[in-house]
Image (cartoon, rainbow, N blue to C red):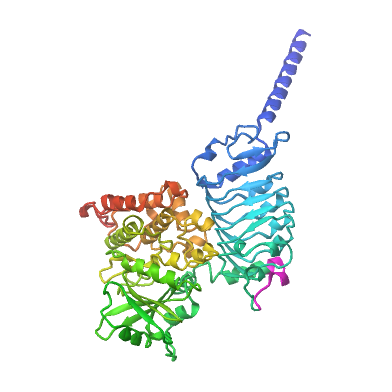
């Protein structure tokens, strides 16, 4: 009898302990919102460390940095993690935060798609995803967010149509999709008709009354279902955003972002039978020569200009068509015909060109003079037989070896450092890219088109001018605000270094397919300590010490925060001390091991 009572007492104690353990375990289990945020964290591949303080053992995420909860319910209502160098995809599990009101992830390095599951967060009032590398379509499910007041997804690489469902968000106060690759008609029904042109700037494929661009019978989002409209948008955008796997088509698509289709098609696919004059001076022309750089009379130059036609086209840039101008004595020059001129700025144009013509440096393309006529603005530069770095890297069969690539990087750095620190006035380039690095007969680099972005910018919309043809090189803050600084040039230079090292364009097709650009690819490789894999496998004579030094410099240049980037003077110092000095005997030979 005593034994039975003792056993019963032990059973009661055991049951009590189990109940107590279950109660404790239940109280310390992370809330569903916390689990959703941990899923978000697991999709982030790199950051400045802010997410390391998110502890799974907490009962709720309310004390986590960047997270704000409702005091009573402990539900997450704000997720604010802007400017924290977050890289990776945005987890669809954020759609489980049913009471989320503000999602602020702007100015990071997120890539991939905007999760359609965000449409489940019906209490959302603000979505701020600008200044990332997000791609794909704008989810039509965002139209479910009837409480949404602010939507900013500018400065990404989103494609396709603007979903008609967005126009039904009647509480929307601010809306910005600028600086993407959107196409088609802007929905005219609903709230989107209330937003200014700046909300849509920098999307060359868009049309509609909001931007004063007729659609010319093109696809209308109002006449299609969201699904069919989105699919059509993807097909149309493939010629504007995605680079074809074919090298030839890839070159065509990239240049299409920078210049007129007709000019490029002519150059790429050959001459036709039309040989009409391309430049019509129409009388009243004047030629200005800087410092005796053009030893010809104005009459001789104008006579030559009037003979130029399509056969003389050698390239197209973001500012106009480039012709080969051969004089009778055999000297050859490059003539850039400016295609965009703001009315009433002739005096400003001439004053600025006088300044640009006075800037001389071994690693800058020399502006010799210009022709000013009622119908054309023609800039006369030195002709460089090596063509552009873009052509040398991506369009020619012969490969650049390691030493040549390093010399090109250093030459470009010298030119840009001179513009930033040594010339007067100092110049922010604003459009550093491989097509603006020209090569002479010895493959020495010279920076071209400096000063033109400022000279020809659109006074009403910086973004429209900036984004055209240069996506992939732009610093996040530059894409978002349109305000250029020396540090935005440094970012573009860092992208240029990665392009030279890898042999891939910043928006290469193989990267876009993975939701990346070249900076996102580098960040991914860094997380796995595989950064050396970025080097072009076709490049001969790679020197490992120089490669590591170049990667270190590029990593600092493409830091998401401008304050974390070095100056070009510092970049040049590092290049000369750490890249160009290693002993030639250290050259890497894959067959020597």
Q: Is residue 370 visible?
A: yes
Toward the top, the furthest residue is: 2
Q: Is residue 550 above or below residue 20?
A: below
Residue 139 quadrant: bottom right
Residue 165 belongs to the span the image colors magenta: no
Q: Position of residue 332 (x, y in %)?
A: 29, 79
Residue nearest the viewer, comparing 361 with 63: 361
Q: Position of residue 380 (x, y in %)?
A: 34, 76
Q: Residue furthest right?
A: 1
Q: Is residue 399 visible?
A: no
Choose top left, top right, bottom left or bottom right for residue 200: bottom right
Answer above or below: position of 411 versus 52: below
- How many numbered marks appear? 0
**Residue 344: x, y in percent?**
49, 73
* Front one among 283 and 116: 283
Left or right of 410 on screen, residue 11: right
Residue 185 image-quadrant placement: bottom right
Q: In the image, what residue occupies the spot 66% across and 70% down?
A: 209
Q: What residue is drawn where x is 49% and y is 57%? A: 483
Nearest the eye: 334 or 540: 334
Quadrant containing the N terminus in the rendered view: top right
Is residue 349 found left or right of 112 in the rendered image?
Answer: left
Residue 145 in percent (x, y) is at 72, 53
Say if the magenta span includes residue 224. Answer: yes
* Range drawn in magenta: 217-228
Outermost residue to the front? 347
């Amino acid at each position: 009898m005593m034994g039975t009572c003792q056993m019963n007492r032990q059973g009661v104690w055991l049951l009590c302990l189990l109940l107590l353990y279950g109660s404790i375990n239940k109280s310390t289990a992370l809330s569903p919102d916390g689990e959703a945020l941990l899923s978000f964290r697991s999709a982030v591949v790199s950051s400045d460390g802010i997410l390391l303080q998110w502890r799974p053992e907490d009962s709720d995420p309310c004390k986590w940095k960047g997270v704000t909860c409702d005091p009573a319910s402990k539900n997450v209502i704000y997720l604010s993690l802007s400017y924290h160098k977050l890289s990776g995809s945005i987890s669809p599990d954020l759609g489980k935060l049913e009471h989320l009101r503000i999602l602020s992830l702007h100015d990071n390095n997120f890539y991939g798609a905007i999760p359609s599951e965000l449409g489940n967060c019906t209490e959302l009032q603000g979505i701020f995803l600008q200044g990332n590398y997000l791609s794909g379509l704008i989810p039509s499910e965002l139209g479910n967010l009837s409480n949404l007041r602010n939507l900013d997804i500018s400065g990404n690489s989103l494609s396709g149509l603007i979903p008609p469902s967005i126009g039904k968000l009647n509480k929307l106060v601010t809306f910005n999709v600028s600086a993407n690759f959107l196409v088609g008609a802007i929905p005219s029904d609903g709230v989107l008709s209330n937003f200014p042109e700046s909300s849509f700037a920098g999307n060359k494929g868009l049309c509609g009354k909001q931007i004063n661009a007729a659609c010319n019978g093109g696809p209308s989002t109002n006449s299609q279902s969201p699904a069919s409209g989105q699919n059509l948008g993807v097909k149309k955008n493939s010629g504007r955003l995605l680079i074809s796997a074919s090298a030839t088509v890839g070159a065509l698509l990239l240049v299409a972002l920078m210049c007129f289709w007709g000019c490029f098609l002519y150059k790429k696919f050959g001459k036709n039978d039309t040989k009409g004059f391309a430049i019509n001076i129409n009388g009243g022309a004047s030629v200005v020569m800087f410092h005796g750089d053009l030893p010809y009379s104005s009459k001789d130059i104008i006579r030559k200009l009037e003979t130029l036609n399509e056969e003389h086209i050698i390239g197209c840039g973001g500012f106009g068509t480039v012709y080969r101008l051969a004089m009778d004595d055999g000297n050859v020059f490059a003539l850039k015909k400016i295609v965009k001129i703001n009315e009433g700025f002739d005096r400003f144009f001439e004053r600025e060109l006088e300044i640009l013509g006075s800037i001389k440096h071994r690693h800058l393309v020399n502006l010799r003079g210009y022709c000013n006529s009622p119908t054309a603005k023609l800039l006369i530069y030195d002709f460089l037989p090596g063509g552009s770095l873009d052509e040398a890297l991506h369009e020619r069969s012969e490969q650049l070896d390691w030493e040549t690539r390093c010399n090109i990087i250093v030459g470009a750095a010298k030119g840009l450092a001179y513009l930033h620190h040594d010339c007067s006035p100092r110049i922010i380039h604003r459009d550093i890219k491989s097509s603006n690095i020209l090569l002479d007969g010895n493959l020495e680099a010279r920076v071209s088109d400096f000063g033109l972005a400022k000279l020809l910018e659109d006074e009403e919309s910086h973004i429209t001018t900036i984004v055209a043809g240069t996506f992939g090189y732009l610093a996040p803050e530059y894409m978002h605000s349109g305000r250029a600084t020396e540090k935005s040039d440094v970012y573009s230079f860092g992208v240029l270094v990665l392009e030279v090292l890898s042999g891939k364009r910043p928006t290469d097709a193989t990267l876009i397919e993975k939701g990346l650009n070249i900076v996102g690819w580098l960040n991914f490789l860094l997380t796995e300590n595989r950064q050396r894999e970025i080097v072009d496998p076709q490049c001969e004579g790679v020197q490992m010490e120089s490669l590591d030094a170049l990667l270190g410099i590029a990593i600092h240049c493409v830091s998401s925060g401008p304050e974390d980037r070095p100056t070009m003077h510092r970049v040049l110092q590092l290049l000369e001390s750490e890249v160009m000095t290693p002993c030639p005997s250290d050259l890497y030979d894959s067959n020597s091991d």
